[in-house]
Structures are given as structure tokens and as C-alpha cells.
Amino acid sequence: MKAISLLGSTGSIGTQTLDIVAQYPDQFRIVGLAAGRNVEMLAAQIQQFRPAIA
């Protein structure tokens, strides 16, 4: 299992990356999320992926 820390998780590439992670939960684990401005979306991502660091 690959551990992933994702910077810019609320942007276009970040959300696409999280879509792929959600499709393959046995292969990837989100350990960290960071975002610049979209706090509401970041909060939703934290609830879904439960990273150790956000």
C-alpha cells in the first residue's frame, strides 16, 4: 500500500488524484492533505479519507 500526502488537494489535479485513491483503497492510503483556500472542500476530504495530517 502506498502512503500519499497530497498538497493542493482541493484543486483540479488534487481532486482527480483523490478520485483515483477512492477507486483503489487497497492500493493507496491518504496520510496528509493540504489546501490553500477551499476550506469547506478540505473538511469534506478529511472526513472521507481520515488523514493523519491535515
Image (cartoon, helix red, strand yellow):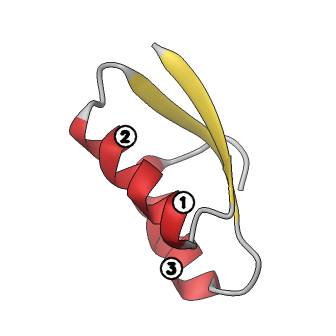
The foreground one among 22 and 44 is 22
Horizontal and vertical percent position of residue 40: 54, 86
Q: Indicate which disc, 1 or 3, sits on the residue closer to the N terminus.
A: 1
State the CA–CA distance, disc 3 to disc 2: 16 Å
Q: Indicate which disc, 2 or 1, sits on the residue closer to the N terminus.
A: 1
Horizontal and vertical percent position of residue 46: 53, 60
State the CA–CA distance, disc 2 to disc 1: 10 Å
Q: Which residue is mark 3?
A: 41
Residue depicted at x 32% and y 53%: 19
Instruction: Count residues near mark 3 (Cα–Cα under 10 Å), then give few for <14, some for 14-19, many for 20+.
Output: some
Residue depicted at x 50% and y 79%: 41
Above or below: residue 53 compared with residue 36: above
State the CA–CA distance, disc 1 to disc 3: 11 Å
Q: In the structure shown, which secondary structural element does the residue marked by tag 2 occupy?
A: helix
Horizontal and vertical percent position of residue 34: 72, 61
Residue depicted at x 50% and y 71%: 12
Quarter of the rendering containing residue 26: top left
The foreground one among 47 and 19 is 19
Q: In the structure shown, which secondary structural element does the residue marked by tag 1 occupy?
A: helix
Q: Name the front one of labels 1 and 3.
A: 1
- Say left or right for 46 vs 35: left
Above or below: residue 1 compared with residue 22: above
Instruction: Count residues near mark 2 (Cα–Cα under 10 Å), then give few for <14, some for 14-19, many for 20+.
Output: some
Residue depicted at x 30% and y 30%: 25
Q: In the structure shown, which secondary structural element does the residue marked by tag 3 occupy?
A: helix
Task: For the residues labelled 3 and 2, say whether their Cβ atoms are less than 8 Å apart.
Answer: no
Instruction: Count residues near mark 1 (Cα–Cα under 10 Å), then give few for <14, some for 14-19, many for 20+.
Output: some
Task: Give the numbered dot on residue 14.
Answer: 1
> Which amino acid is tagged 3?
Met
Task: For the residues labelled 1 and 3, say whether their Cβ atoms are less than 8 Å apart.
Answer: no
Task: Give the numbered dot on residue 21.
Answer: 2
